[in-house]
Amino acid sequence: MSKIIVLMGAPGAGKGTQARLIHERLGLPQISTGDILRALREAEEIHTTQAEGRLVSDDVVIGVVRDRTARDDCRNGYILDGFPRTLTQAKMLEDLALEQEGHHVHSRDVPVDVLVKRIIGRRTCPVCGEIYNIYFKPPKTDEVCDQHPGVKLKIRPDDSEEKIRVRFQTYETETVPLTDYYQESNRLHRVDGEQQTERIYREIEPIVANGAHGAA
Ligand code: AMP
């Protein structure tokens, strides 16, 4: 039986970090719609929308998820990081998951000033995808990946203070209502996203490994 894990949470809540850990330790593929959209070729309009912090259209994102989850490595399940973000996307996921057992994890309650620091401080290695933060998890050498000494870390174009405001607003209006949607069907697990990365992971792991009733 396959498992679908949805990681929800405000920008900067740590969805990507947890998705990487689940992938490394439990072997489920991480599907980050933000990363896939950013890597699309000849997609100027999409990249502009991303850089502005607005949502890409449901049709486009749904197409991306449909294609990616059809691949062989998703047979036993997958982690969705950044999808669904709207009710339409959530309903599409229901269709996709009809024969699958879905579990949902929501990371929450990270104070806004921490989220902002997490986003402004975020640096990513373009080679291995490792996520650093100049405030909370700095690399050994400034702006350089620990594993790839010659490689300068990257800053996402939408990780600026100005764009963060738009992204938070979009999150509040479009995505927060999804928590009710999942709560009503008893699939929402709340996790305190302000804890240390490993503590959060320890809360999430049994939910992922044991199923919907594995953790509070
Ligand atoms: P993320 O890397 O998850 O923070 O996503 C970065 C940006 O990609 C978002 O601000 C949106 O512009 C776009 N994006 C990612 N996932 C979605 C989605 N599920 N629906 C619409 N837009 C998305």
Image: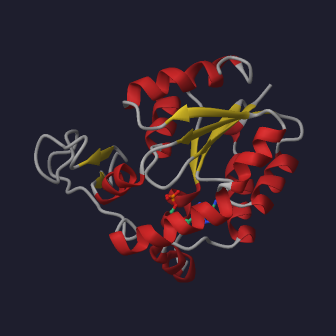
Q: Residue shown at 35%/49% (left/top)?
A: 114
Q: Residue shown at 52%/30% (left/top)?
A: 22
Residue 14 percent location from the top left of the image = 45, 43
Q: Residue shown at 52%/82% (left/top)?
A: 44
Task: Say left or right for 174 vs 81.
Answer: right
Residue 162 percent location from the top left of the image = 37, 75
Q: How is the image coloured?
A: secondary structure
Task: Say left or right for 41 vs 160.
Answer: right
Number of marks in the image? Answer: 0
Report ligand 1 position as a quadrant.
bottom right
Using the image as rendered, state which of residue 68 and residue 176 is in the foreground. Answer: 176
Looking at the image, which residue sits at the far left? 141
Using the image as rendered, state which of residue 149 and residue 95 is in the foreground. Answer: 95
Residue 11 percent location from the top left of the image = 48, 55
Task: Say left or right for 41 vs 77.
Answer: left
> From where the camera sits, is residue 26 visible?
no
> From where the camera sits, is residue 58 visible?
yes
Q: Quadrant of the C terminus?
A: top right
Q: Quadrant of the N terminus?
A: top right
Q: Residue shown at 19%/43% (left/top)?
A: 138
Residue 37 percent location from the top left of the image = 55, 65
Image quadrant where residue 119 sits: bottom left
Q: Is residue 53 above or below residue 30?
A: below
Q: Is residue 210 above or below residue 137?
A: above
Using the image as rendered, state which of residue 134 and residue 96 is in the foreground. Answer: 134
